[in-house]
Image (tube, rainbow, N blue to C red):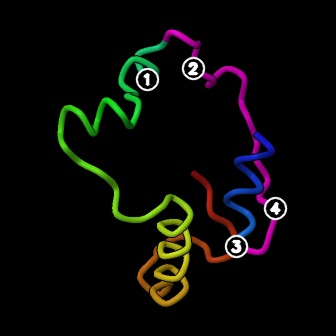
Amino acid sequence: MTAFRDFVGEPLGTKPLVDRNPSRVRPENSEVQRLLSPKTQIRALLNWRGQISLNQGLCSTIAWFETHMHLCHHAREEYVV
């Protein structure tokens, strides 16, 4: 969880609070795990390859929100997923 917090927090210049609710954590063999495919399988089946890295995409998304925050209908000080 620390790696995720650092990965997301670094481009934001913060350390986000990650609040895990144990009752919502999926078991290892859940349907969500079965739906996830390794990127090599996706490349083979769809002949698809991402054009930017996850970090570049995250930074682009942050930049978009910084310039389009007026379009968001949630409180600016707190965002809850």
Instruction: Residue under label 1, please give it.
Output: 32
User: Going from the N terminus, do you reach mark 2 or mark 3 first?
Assistant: 3
The residue drawn where x is 76% and y is 46% is 3
Q: Residues within 10 Å of mark 1 (few under 14, many from 20)?
A: few
Instruction: Residue under label 2, please give it.
Output: 26
* Nearer the observer, 12 or 22: 12
41 up-or-down from 2: above or below: above
Do residues under tags 3 and 1 come within 8 Å of each other at their CB atoms? Answer: no
Residue 55 in the image: state x and y as whole percent.
56, 63
Residue 16 shown left or right of residue 24 in the figure: right
Distance, label 2 to label 1, CA atoms, is 8 Å
User: Going from the N terminus, do you reach mark 3 or mark 1 first?
Assistant: 3
Which contiguous range is marked in magenta? 12-29
Q: Amino acid at mark 3?
A: Leu
**SS state under label 2:** loop
Residue 35 in the image: state x and y as whole percent.
36, 24
Distance, label 3 to label 1, CA atoms, is 28 Å
**SS state under label 3:** helix
Q: Amino acid at mark 2?
A: Arg
Instruction: Residue under label 3, please give it.
Output: 12
Residue 22 in the image: state x and y as whole percent.
72, 23
Q: Which mark is residue 15?
A: 4
